Structure formats: C-alpha cells, structure tokens
Amino acid sequence: MNVIRFSDLCAQGKVAAKRVFIRADLNVPQDAQGGITEDTRIRASVPCIQMALDAGAAVMVTSHLGRPTEGAFKPADSLAPVAQRLGELLGRAVPLVSDWVDGVTVAPGQVVMLENCRVNPGEKKNDPALSRKMAALCDIFVHDAFGTAHRAEASTYGIAEYAPVACAGPLLAAEMDAIAKALLAPKRPLVAIVAGSKVSTKLTILQSLAANVDQLIVGGGIANTFMLAAGLNIGKSLAEPDLLDQAKAVIAAMQARGAAVPIPTDVVTAKTFAADAAATVKAATEVADDDLILDIGPQTAQALAAQLMRAGTIVWNGPLGVFEFAAFENGTKVVAQAIAASSAFSIAGGGDTLAAIAKYGIEAQIGYISTGGGAFLEVLEGKTLPAFEILGRRAGA
C-alpha cells in the first residue's frame, strides 16, 4: 500500500524542528480509581514517539480514552494516568495540555500529551472546522492508531486531509504490511479461522473470505450453525437457525472453488454452561437434544491442526470453544499450538483471540498480532479502512 511512512521521513532528515502531531491509541483499561490495569497500547505507542523525539521534533500526542461526552469533560475522561505512564516508559516528564485545539506550545525535543481528543465537539462527526484547527497545529500528522483506523473522525481522518504532510506511524505501517502479506498476496494455502458466538456478527466476513481462502475453519457458536446447516443435531447449543441459508451459501461458495468448510466430526458437550459442568466427548452425529456443544472434539482438533501445519498463511479470529473453562479449552489450545508450530505466516486479531494467545504463551510464534479489534474485522470483511484510504490519497498528492 502506497503511503508516506514516518520512519522514512525521519531517516531522510525531514522531521527535525518540525511540529509532529501523533494520533495514538492509548485507550487502556482502568480500575474504579482510574489506575491503568493493562498498558500494552501505551507501550506499543512508544516507538513512534521516541522516533519523533530522536529526530528532533516538537511532539504532540493525543488519543481517545473511554466514551466521553463531547463538550462535557469529566475528571474520569482525563489522559492524566496515561501521560504519567508514558512518562515512566520514556524516562521523561510528559506534560498534559487541556483546551489545546486553538494552540499548543511545545519546543523541538519536547513531548506533550493533548487531553482526550474525543471530548472536542465535532470529533466523532469529523467536523471540517475542528479538523482544520488540528491540522494547523502541526507540520506532520502521524496516524499510529490502527485500533481507530476504521473510524473517520477529526483526529484520525479530517486532520490527515488538511495537515501539510500525513503519514503512517510504525505501528500502523506494520499493520498495513501484515494485512497485505496475509490477504493481498498470501502464500497458499490460505486458511482462515473465524469463530465466535454468532454468524450474524461475522456473516459478511465469512462471505468475503469464502471468495478468497483455501480453507475456512469455523468455531464456537458459528460452528454450531454450520453443523445445523449440514443436517446435524446440535441439541440446545447456541446457534442461529434463521441464518442456515447463508451458512449453506458459504459452504457452497467454498465447494465451488474446490475449497472447504470442515464440519466437526466430534464435539465436547455438557448439560449446563458452567466451568464445573461434566464434559463428554461425542461423535457429531450423536448429540442429544439436551446437550450443549462447548468445544470441538479431539479428533476434529487434530484434523484441523494437521491442516494448519500444511498452510502457507493463517488468519485467526476467535477461539474454537469456551476456552475459559478448562474442560472445554482443548480445541482452542490444540489449534493455537498448531498455529504456533506451523511455518505459515500467521496474523491474529480480536480480544478473545489475544486472550487465548496469552493463555497459551505463543505470542512469539505468531507472525503478527493485530492491535485493532473492529478495524481487524473490517479488513477481513474486505473493506478499505478510512485511515488507509486518506493516507494513500495524501501520499499521491
């Protein structure tokens, strides 16, 4: 994808003494007292900020945090805890600036945090007047927040339209490269794993992937709907009977291309949805009317693992079963370990997927772990993200 990369501008000496506005994704979880409980996103933003400082820029960083009401700032909306944590990671003070839209004082070699951008009236609607004011603050706009790349807002899109230079930060550029490698020019076979509770939330993703992948593995409640479409009894398992025609259409689309949607041959069932429920492995043809399917069976898991070991590229979104419960985690665990052991290039995204990766300690074995939930899903749907579109357009300007 043709975009200007901030790393290239730094290497070319085009950043020294410039005012650099970085849109980061610092939307971290907090406890009731406002303390940060997990700082991955802040740590992920450090390379871009440090790159700008090392290049001699005057650096401004902003992000949204939570769901504030525009024009009605509350103390709970403040990026103060984020600024403090960023300062600890950078080894320097990071002053927090409020009411910054009409002007920011920052010198080359300094970094300031601009208060929660989503409090500014007009932010979410991508107001042109607000966007122009933001753009006037800087010489270079750097988009480094893939988690917001699917939103066209003033601090993610509008500013990129009007800033003198608009470019991709290292985090966003890495996402672009991984997506291109996995979906635009994949090494075959290309295998996609799409799992979750409902087909309806991922139907367009399934339809889009069915036209491109060599194998489409479904899991969770989605797999139950596909089992139902294949004529199997799923008992009282979570499923969407009203979407059977769509599931059948995805299966048919794959078959027409000589590809497949593997239907589980065995499953793990329980009578109740609980961590201590008794787990029973059954053939997929022997599910009782009062059974809940909570995982794929060991035979199915091993078959999928063998297919993943032969893959050239793997795209993974969603666990295969209720992996939070020990009795129903085997399918997700076996598949996760197969992805880790495979020589394929793998890209994984989505909150539950990241939780599974962390649980099984395979972070280092995944080719690329996406930082954006909604943005990652929209890429899988085949959509062009607003951030990619505007940065590509500005690169050609």
Image: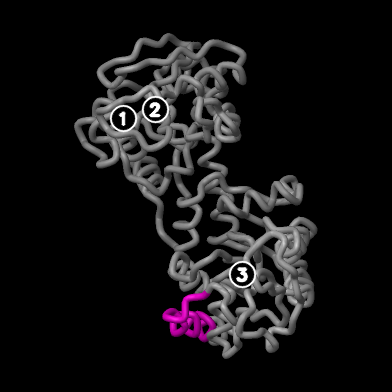
Q: Are marks 2 and 1 in contact (CB under 8 Å)?
A: yes
Please report the residue visible at 31 percent of the width from the left and 25 percent of the height from the top: 73
Q: Is residue 103 visible?
A: yes
Answer above or below: position of 201 versus 5.
Answer: below
The picture quadrant where one finds residue 296 is: bottom right
Magenta-highlighted stretch: main secondary structure? helix
Which secondary structure, mark 1? helix
Q: Which residue bears the numbered disc 1? A: 119
The amino acid on which the numbered mark 1 sits, given as a three-letter code, is Val
Please give the label number shown on residue 219: 3
Q: Is residue 2 above or below residue 225?
A: above
Q: Position of residue 8 (x, y in %)?
A: 52, 32
* Image-quadrant location for residue 64: top left
Which secondary structure lies at badge 3?
strand
* Magenta residues (range): 239-253
Marks 2/3 in contact by CB < 8 Å: the verdict is no
Quarter that holds the C terminus: top left
Q: Quadrant of residue 330?
A: bottom right
The picture places residue 6, in percent across and down from the top left corner, at 49, 32
Q: Is residue 71 left or right of residue 333?
A: left
| 70 on left or right of 375 | left
Q: Which residue is mark 2?
A: 77
- Viewer-side label of 2, 1: 2
Lower sequence index among marks 2 and 1: 2
The residue lying at 56 percent from left, 48 percent from top is 177
